[in-house]
Structures are given as structure tokens and as C-alpha cells.
Image (tube, rainbow, N blue to C red):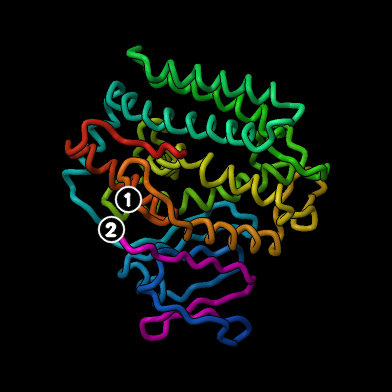
């Protein structure tokens, strides 16, 4: 089992990352604010005006530590990695499956089964936690709709990719239509009227987009670490600059990792309107204080120990993307008949 490595998030504007021996130094205005052995890092994520020395980038690449650059608001810009790892035969099989519509649909079906099941579990959990809530009939109807979608996916019916995307889009619409009912705070700043992005226009969407970016970073790194090509997916098709396989693998993790953390941060009062910037054009972004709250909670979530539903072994949550990527490689190599997605309970 791969050791759980930490991700270093650098938010302070004007920071400079340098190499000293085997360590990464974080300097602000000429003063060293932190020292981190590179071999203890799984990734580095820089927000906004953060500079890196070329010697540090080279050292990180040689040690398998990816360095990702994001805007201050969390939009992905680029990623610096080392030489491609993994077996060329594995990638050739990945490309063959991706080029075959039927094979792609068979794998994509597993992603969507887990995504919709995990969305349904989130809805059912809300019903269990608030049995006397006045809006429970809406949640019950949504749960039934999602269950019907799962029944269709479990049936012998053959789906092509377009049909799968249509089914997923319908399920996502139902899920996000009751997402406001999962938010129990009375603060009007956290009102949610539907999923929107580029840019997000309310705090809930800003939070969702930010966490999806962090999750995509982790899943992409996991895909690369086991030798897969993160740009070639099955549900998400090829597009220059898009990590399609990483987006595929993170579908089943969105409700479990990102959505539930969003609900926890809002419902527990850990995030408040002061943690967001409301732009005159309508866009909403998290400020630096808000990002720190989210990153702390995200890292704590990754340290939680769970029992993996397929391996039946206890692992830390941060290892889930790596395990799922590894299971994908075993399926592509023929060791597993089907890809076992992450079904959370």
C-alpha cells in the first residue's frame, strides 16, 4: 500500500519556493516561513502570485512530486511533472479501450453507477438525520428518482455514451435540485438555486468549484502515479488540456469528498459570508481566509481512516484516488473483469 503523502498548499501572495538540500523552503519577503522535506510531499499546489525556483521544480519532478499552479481564486493553470511513469502496454490498452465506443461505455457505466449511488446516499443520510423536516417529501422523491436511474444502469440494457450522459445529466439535475434542502443554515448568503460555474455566482457554487479543483489535482496525480494517461478518458472524451480520465475517476468521488464537505462546512458554521468576495459583475470567490478554512478541512478529511468497500481494508481517505486508479489499471490489464467503483456507505 502506498504511503499517504501530504499536499502542500501555498496561499500567501509573493511567496517564493526554493530548494535547499533535499528540502523545499517557503520564503516570504526574504524570510523562511517553512521547510518541508520533498520526499514527504505528494504534491504542491500554488495559488496566485507564487514563484518557484527551476532547481526546486527539477528536484520535485525527479522525486515524483507534481507542482500545480492555480489562480488566486482556484482556477487551474498548469502542472509541472517529471518523466511519464508506467508500462507502455498499459497505456496502449487504455487508448484501445478509449477508441472503442462500446468498451468506453462499459467502463463509463461503472463511474456513473457509483456517482449516482453516492448522491442517493447523501440524500438518504439527510433524511435519516432530519426525520421531522418539512421538506422530506422532496428528498424522498429525489431518492426514488436516483434509485430508478440506478435500476436502469444495473439492468442488462446496453447503453451508448450519449445515453449514459443523458441519464447522468438527468440524475445530476434531480440531485442539485434538492441540494438546497441539504443546507440547514438560515443564512441567506448560502442560498443555492442550482449548479453554475465559470464564474460561480454564489458562495455554495464557489465552494463546490474550489473543492472539485482540489479533488481533480489529487485524482490526476493518482492516475499518473500508476502509469495511466490522465488525458485519455472513457466518459469524458479527448479535449486539449483536459484531464479526461481524472474527470472520469473523480465522478464517483464528487458526492463523497467534495459535496459532503461543502455541506459540513456550511451547516457547522465554519464558513461565513465574510469568507467570500462578491464581485460587481456577479462572480463570487473565496478569499484567502476562506481558502485556509477549506484547505484545513480538506486535509483533515484526507487523514480520516475508512474501510474501502472493495478491498475491505482500512485506509486513509486520501488514498482513495490512488486505490481507484490502481483498480483501473488492474481492470485494463485483465486482472479484474470489471472496474470496481467507490461505493460509499
Q: Is residue 330 above or below residue 277?
A: above
Q: Is residue 33 above or below residue 341?
A: below
Give residue 313's mark.
1
Magenta-colored stretch includes residue 306: no
| Spatial CA span between label 1 and label 2 | 10 Å
Question: What's the residue at 36%, 72% (across, down)?
Answer: 58
For the N terminus, the quadrant is bottom left
Question: What's the residue at 26%, 36% (across, down)?
Answer: 95
The answer to which quarter of the image holds residue 340 is: top left
Q: Where is residue 335 in the image (x, y as percent from the top left)?
A: 17, 38
Q: What stretch is highlighted in magenta?
A: 1-26
In-front residue for pair 197/112 = 112
Can residue 166 be seen from the camera position used here?
no
Can residue 126 be seen from the camera position used here?
yes
Q: Tell me whether the residue at label 1 lies in contact with that at label 2, contact meaning CB atoms closer than 8 angstroms.
A: yes
Magenta-colored stretch includes residue 21: yes
Q: Position of residue 63 (x, y in %)?
A: 31, 69
Question: What's the residue at 48%, 82% (across, down)?
Answer: 35
Left or right: 57 as drawn, with respect to 329 = right
Q: Closer to the N terminus: mark 1 or mark 2?
A: 2
The local secondary structure at tag 2 comes to loop
In-front residue for pair 270/16 = 270
Left or right: 326 as drawn, with respect to 72 = left
Question: What's the residue at 41%, 57% (across, down)?
Answer: 316
Residue beneath disc 2? 1
Q: Where is residue 77 in the image (x, y as percent from the top left)?
A: 52, 54
Q: In this view, does 228 lie above or below 238?
A: below
Q: Position of residue 117 (x, y in %)?
A: 48, 30
Amino acid at each position: 500500500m502506498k504511503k499517504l503523502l501530504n499536499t502542500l498548499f501555498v496561499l500567501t501572495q509573493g511567496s517564493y519556493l526554493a530548494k535547499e538540500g533535499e528540502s523545499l523552503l517557503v520564503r516570504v519577503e526574504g524570510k523562511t516561513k517553512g521547510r518541508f522535506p520533498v520526499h514527504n510531499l505528494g504534491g504542491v499546489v500554488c495559488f496566485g502570485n507564487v514563484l518557484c525556483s527551476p532547481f526546486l521544480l527539477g528536484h520535485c519532478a525527479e522525486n515524483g512530486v507534481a507542482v500545480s499552479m492555480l489562480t488566486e481564486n482556484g482556477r487551474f493553470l498548469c502542472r509541472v511533472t517529471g518523466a511519464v511513469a508506467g508500462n507502455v502496454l498499459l497505456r496502449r490498452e487504455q487508448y484501445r479501450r478509449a477508441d472503442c465506443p462500446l468498451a468506453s461505455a462499459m467502463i463509463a457505466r461503472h463511474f456513473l453507477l457509483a456517482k449516482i449511488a453516492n448522491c442517493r446516499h447523501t440524500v438518504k443520510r439527510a433524511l435519516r438525520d432530519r426525520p421531522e423536516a418539512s421538506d422530506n417529501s422532496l428528498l424522498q422523491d429525489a431518492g426514488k428518482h436516483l434509485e430508478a436511474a440506478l435500476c436502469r444502469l444495473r439492468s442488462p440494457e446496453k447503453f451508448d455514451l450519449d445515453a449514459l450522459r443523458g441519464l447522468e445529466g438527468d440524475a445530476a439535475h434531480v440531485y442539485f435540485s434538492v441540494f438546497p434542502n441539504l443546507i440547514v443554515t438560515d443564512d441567506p448568503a448560502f442560498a443555492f438555486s442550482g449548479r453554475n460555474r465559470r464564474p460561480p455566482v454564489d458562495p455554495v457554487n464557489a465552494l463546490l468549484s474550489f473543492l472539485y479543483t482540489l479533488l481533480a489535482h489529487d485524482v490526476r496525480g493518482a492516475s499518473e502515479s500508476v502509469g495511466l494517461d490522465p488525458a485519455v478518458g472513457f466518459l469524458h472524451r479527448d479535449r486539449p488540456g483536459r484531464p479526461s480520465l481524472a474527470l472520469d475517476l473523480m465522478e464517483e468521488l464528487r458526492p463523497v469528498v467534495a459535496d459532503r464537505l461543502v455541506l459540513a462546512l456550511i451547516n457547522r458554521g465554519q464558513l461565513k459570508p465574510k469568507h467570500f468576495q462578491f464581485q460587481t459583475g456577479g462572480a463570487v470567490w473565496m478569499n484567502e481566509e476562506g481558502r485556509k478554512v477549506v484547505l484545513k478541512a480538506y486535509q483533515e478529511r484526507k487523514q480520516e481512516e475508512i474501510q474501502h468497500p472493495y478491498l475491505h481494508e482500512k485506509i486513509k481517505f486520501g488514498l482513495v484516488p490512488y486505490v481507484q486508479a490502481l483498480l483501473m489499471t488492474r481492470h485494463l490489464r485483465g486482472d479484474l473483469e470489471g472496474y470496481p467503483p467507490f461505493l460509499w456507505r
